[in-house]
Image (cartoon, rainbow, N blue to C red):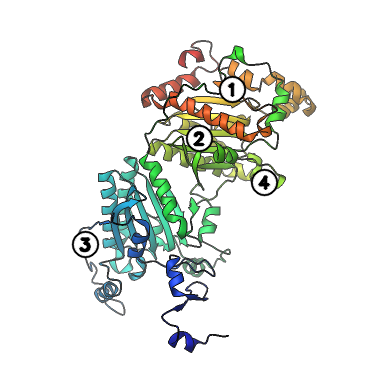
Amino acid sequence: MTVTDTEIDTATEPSWMLCPRCGAIVYAKRYERAGYVCPECDGHGPLTADQRIDSLLDTDSVEPIGYAETVTDPLEFTDSRSYVDRHAQARAVTGLPDGIRCARGTIDGAPVVLAVMDFRFLGGSLGAAVGEAVTTAAETALESRIPLVLVTASGGARMQEGILALMQMAKTSQALRALDDAGILTISVIADPTYGGVAASFATSTDIIIAEPKARLGFAGPRVISQTIGETLPPGFQTAEFLVEHGIVDMICHRSALRDRLARLLSMAADRGRRIPATELQPPIISDPASLPERDPWESVRAARELGRPTTLDYFAAAVDEFVELHGDRMSADCPAMITGLARLDGVPVAVVGTQKGHTAAELTRRNFGMPTPSGYRKSARLLRLAAKLGLPVITLVDTAGAYPGVTAEEQGQAVAIAESLKLLAGLPVPVITVITGEGGSGGALALAVADRVLALENAVYSVISPEGCASILWKDAAAAPRAAKALRVDSTSLVRLGVADAVIPEPPGGAHRDPAVAAANLRQALRHVLIGCGSLPVTELLARRHHRFRAYGTIRPTIEEYR
């Protein structure tokens, strides 16, 4: 049976509607119950500011936040109508004083300040009132020392307020900078669309950027770009999916899961400073060189490269809790060979970083064989800075043959990206624990390993160069790789004896790939033990010990042991 337009308008208007995204006929109440998400195309329809607040904050926790009165019509602007008339009409239609609503409350018990834009009000444009509201929300978060969540939907700065609208970009950015300096978590949720001055200020200057599916975000809209420079735009340009691929947003989150995702992130921020309780259980690590067996370095190399060995993502799934992956370098790309995110270890929030290989040829190719590009190291640096801001311990897992050596990587500054990571870790004011889980290849591995404690899995290897590379250069024969591995002393026992690694984590008989669950359990217990020891140190002492640790390498006096 075909439903005609007349039937829709007269007979079923109260019950049925057309999806604003795909045009499908959908049951209105079902659409509303699904959070205004179409059951046919999964398109996320617009929400009002009040609907957003109701959907995110706990019932009975909502406390509205007012803001100072702002200039109404600073330019006495008129086009086909006066700005005063347009503003009055927007107020009448939306019931809002301007295009934003702010409140404080809780999300699943975690305190938060929420500022939500409403696109119905003059296209969610950024004027003096919106800028004042965002700034007041940020100042409320600063005073209360609780996270700020911004939900954005905007066409850009409000033209009718001219240069004063432009100044709101600086005003709101200054307010968010104060939250950075105070170590307060900020999150933005990008709704469709978010463009112009909002996109180029508070929407993208938060610690974490979450986008709804297919939400558009950019400085200049597609029409402006096309008309200005005549450039043909790629499919899906500026959509959330495009932006994740290009490293701009951290994640895409369906509206049905958004509240839970925010609750998890806010809870981690609220729980920072927690410490792992001490235990009398013996950690599964061996730090005494005399207790470590002699190993065949080449056999260790072969074991470290075993395809079945657990990867970083395998360990994050089994050895830590509540892992939330964060994507992108906020510049141009999201390197798949570098994994970053937030997690918990025995309830303690931690920042986690690791290189990712794979178990199959297809995954290895997609992950660039675990060799990070410059965007990977810049993504890692983003996470490290967030850890420093929030005071979270850092755990890095290393399994890489080295940094990606291609032409594109060199063009994008591979050496600079590694150098910046080394310097950043050297002064990071939180505990840093590194575990060499497989291969530790040259500067590409060290870029994640300037740490307070370095552990190595039993079959892991760590070296200035691969045995094959060394053999080719010095022996002029790649087949001499076993001889080179022995000469380089790449195995875990040698690493402890040389003072580069602090301890070895035993693997299941036959290697970690034989029993990944046991390997993950051993790793978890080792991390737990080491974090207990590092977590209680004052920052000054932590940094001094880290400095002395690396200062002593290659010298006869003082020895590494004096600073352990």
Q: CA distance from mark 2 to mark 3?
A: 44 Å
Q: Nearer the viewer, mark 4 or mark 1?
A: 1
Q: Quadrant of residue 498?
A: top right
Disc nearer the start of the sequence (4/2): 4
Q: Residue at x 48, y 89 (%)?
A: 6
Disc nearer the start of the sequence (2/3): 3
Whether residue 413 is visible = no
Q: Which image quadrant: the N terminus?
A: bottom right
User: How packed is label 3: few (under 14 Cα within 10 Å), some, or many (20 or more)?
Assistant: some
Name the kind of residue labelled 3 in the image.
Answer: Thr
**Which residue lies under the disc numbered 3?**
70
Q: CA distance from mark 1 to mark 3?
A: 63 Å
Q: CA distance from mark 1 to mark 2?
A: 25 Å
Name the kind of residue labelled 1 in the image.
Answer: Val
**Which residue lies under the disc numbered 4?**
363
Disc nearer the start of the sequence (1/2): 2
Q: Nearer the viewer, mark 1 or mark 2?
A: 1
Q: Residue at x 60, y 20 (%)?
A: 495
Instruction: Measuring from the top left, give residue 34's x and y in whole percent.
Output: 45, 65
Secondary element at tag 4: helix
Whether residue 525 is visible = yes
Residue most toward the top? 557
**Which residue lies under the disc numbered 2?**
421
Q: Residue at x 30, y 71 (%)?
A: 94
Name the kind of residue labelled 2 in the image.
Answer: Ser
User: How packed is label 4: few (under 14 Cα within 10 Å), some, or many (20 or more)?
Assistant: some
Q: CA distance from mark 4 to mark 3?
A: 55 Å
| Proximity of marks 2 and 3: CB atoms separated by less than 8 Å | no
